[in-house]
Image (tube, rainbow, N blue to C red):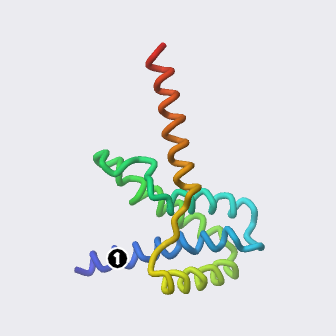
Amino acid sequence: MRFLQAIRVWAKKIKRDSVTLWFAEKHPRTPKLIKFLGMFVVAYALSPIDLIPDFIPVLGYLDDVILLPALIWLTVKLLPMDILIVCQQQADDWMQEKQAKPASRWGIVFVVSVWAVTAVVLWNWVSF
């Protein structure tokens, strides 16, 4: 039971950190490189579509379990502490008020674009 509880706490922290990055991206003092990385991570984290669909055995959950949490952790660690504290508080308040995480249209555009480019490359490779 303790293991399951630890997983739940970890999942809530990851969810909160993705919303924290959403607020950090809008913060005027967030450094440009971290802002860019944060925009990428948030767009993908909040996208309702996965880059690797979950129905693909093992690989489908790879991005949800390893890749995405690692990117969120890295971006949060790169944020200056004062900005991180402010954005975490904003994320906590927002999540408590809305009881949900935001959605990202840019995340959908990103994932669909990657799939479209992959399809075109594969089509060209197979047809020649």
Would you say 47 lies left or right of 64 here? Answer: right
The residue closer to the viewer here, 49 or 67, is: 49
User: Which residue is found at the position 35% from the left and 54% from the top?
Assistant: 61
Q: Residue 120, image x and y in percent?
A: 51, 28
The answer to which image quadrant residue 38 occupies is bottom right
Amino acid under label 1?
Arg
Q: Which residue appears at 60% of the width and 83% of the height?
A: 90
Q: Residue furthest left?
A: 1
Quarter of the view holding residue 21: bottom right
Question: Which residue sits furthest top?
Answer: 128
Return the x and y of residue 73 as percentages of the image width and height: 53, 67
Q: Is residue 42 above or below residue 91?
A: above
- In the rendered image, residue 39, in percent from the top left (x then y), is placed at 63, 60
**Secondary structure at numbered mark 1:** helix
Q: Which residue is mark 1?
A: 8
Where in the figure is residue 72, as x and y percent of width and height?
53, 65
In the image shown, does 2 or 112 lie closer to the viewer?
112
At a point 50% along the width and 34% down the height, the residue shown is: 118
Residue at 40% over, 72% down: 11
Residue density around tag 1, few if under 14, some if 14–19, many if 20 or more, within 10 Å:
few
Q: Give the total number of marks visible in the rendering.
A: 1
Query: Viewed as shown, does residue 10 lie left or right of 77?
Result: left
User: Which is more toward the observer, 50 or 8?
Assistant: 50
Task: Classify residue 19 as left or right of residue 81.
Answer: left
Q: Quadrant of the N terminus?
A: bottom left
Left or right: 7 as drawn, with respect to 110: left
